[in-house]
Image (cartoon, rainbow, N blue to C red):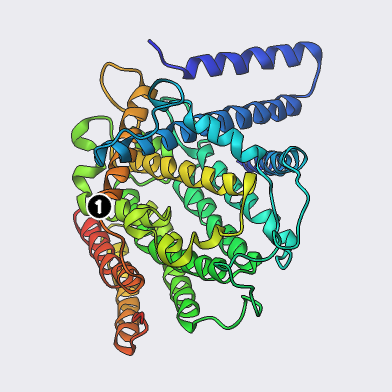
Amino acid sequence: MLELDQLFKNIYLWGENLFTQWGIPLFWLELLGMLIVAVIILAFMSLSVLFLVWWERKVSGHMQSRFGPMRTGWHGWLQTIIDAIKLILKEDTTPGTADKIGFLIAPIIVFVSAFMAYICIPFGKGLIVKDLNIGILYILAITTFTVIGLLTAGWCSNNKFSVLGGFRSAAQIISYEVPLTLSILGVVILSQTLSMQSIVNSQKHIWEWYIFRQPIGFLIYLVAAIAEINRVPFDIPEAEQELVAGFNVEYSGIKFAMFFFAEFANLFLVSAIATTLFLGGWNGPLLPSWIWFFIKSFFLVFVIMWFKWTFPRLRVDQLMGFAWKFLLPLAFINLILTGLFA
Amino acid sequence: MFESYLALALLIIIVTGFGAGIILVSKFIGRRPPLREKLLPYECGNIPEEDARGRFPIKFYLVGILFIIFDIEIAFLFPWAVIYKELGIFGLIEMGIFLAILLIGYLYILKKGGLKWE
């Protein structure tokens, strides 16, 4: 039907033929392929981020009995595109007291680590850039680089709010990293593999989805993932009322846009990982696999946005206590139970 | 297998280049004259009197240390989890002992108030 994996395979084979006919080493084909992959994924990320920002504003609006953006285009669909253009045109200042190099590379680190995780997401049957045999471990490792980016941003801005926001972000993200990884280990025990594509293949039928065999694990993952991406019940680092905007106070223009971009790219990313690990990935009847993947992922994104308007923000001590005193023991109990009954 | 990691390294270079490029483009489009006031760090209208990077609460450091302990532990759990079904009951007992040792450590941290956040 509308499966896309054959299409990409055919394009690759066609390219291989062409390159062997012209006598160019296949290394250049790989290089060209990587360039094309980078462009496709960047385009996909930009589109999904533009859509998610618009959607977030619409969802927020309707949950508060208002409309959200309405003026630009049909129900304001052009709004985020115009915002993006505005951010590129804006002045990009670097504070005089800031550490110039660190200030410059921090948004790039955050941006690159968000992008690199997309390489291992199975968007559909055969639609994965690199199906590494350490897939999920690789994703966990590469997304953790975000912490370094945020800490660099906070420290190098040389602003009280930024420094404190950076510390808080780092403390929060690394605290929630532990229960998050432990909840993923439950799935790894059941599926006996780290490769994302094999994990999806091991949940072909709906009763095999790991959400039914790992309900506690799924909840821990969801809560910890929301904390990882600094979203609302856990958005202490960006608490507007006390820290202005956290680590990105001094950022303006395109560098601010890159942080914002990475934040929403990570929002989709954690939903996509949850879909892959717990909701059967791209498995589903009738519709093409990639459509199923997007339905499930965007549903989870909607749930995370729903959380935003349901739960009030936690205090810092509650936040850290929740991670270390509740989620961590719970994740260990879940892991041991999984081990006993696997 | 090595080739796919090479490809990943290549991708990192490409995307870093892209990120740096877009900042550079914006620098040319969005250039405005810098003023002294504009370059001051933002502090709700006050002029900052000292460097923002002074002393910081020790608890952040403590969280970092605790994270390293538990993260290394998880790094040990990964290979165990992948071959769990091959190991059978042996793996369960062995990892149970490992986790029990860590549990004692965790209880010690809890009792010493290492997880308290004031």
Q: Position of residue A38 (x, y in %)?
A: 62, 32
The residue sitting at 21% across, 32% down in the picture is A206
Let me know if residue A303 appears in the view. Answer: yes
The residue sitting at 35% across, 77% down in the picture is B102
Q: Nearer the viewer, residue A5 or A148?
A: A148
Give the quadrant of the N terminus of chain A: top left
Q: Nearer the viewer, residue A120 or B118?
A: B118
Is B40 on the left-hand or right-hand side of A285?
Answer: right
Of all chains, the one bearing label 1 is A
From this viewpoint, which residue is outermost toward the right?
Answer: A23
Q: Nearer the viewer, residue B44 or A121?
A: B44
Secondary structure beneath dot 1 equals helix
Image mark count: 1
The residue sitting at 28% across, 36% down in the picture is A66
Q: Is residue B27 above or below residue B46?
A: above
The residue sitting at 65% across, 80% down in the picture is B50
User: What residue type is disc 1 on?
Assistant: Leu
Q: Is residue A207 above or below residue A309?
A: above
Q: Position of residue A40 (x, y in %)?
A: 58, 27
Q: Quadrant of residue B53?
A: bottom right
Q: Position of residue B17 (x, y in %)?
A: 72, 41
Is A326 on the left-hand or right-hand side of A57?
Answer: left
Q: Mark 1 sits on what residue?
A: A219
Q: Quadrant of residue A182?
A: bottom left
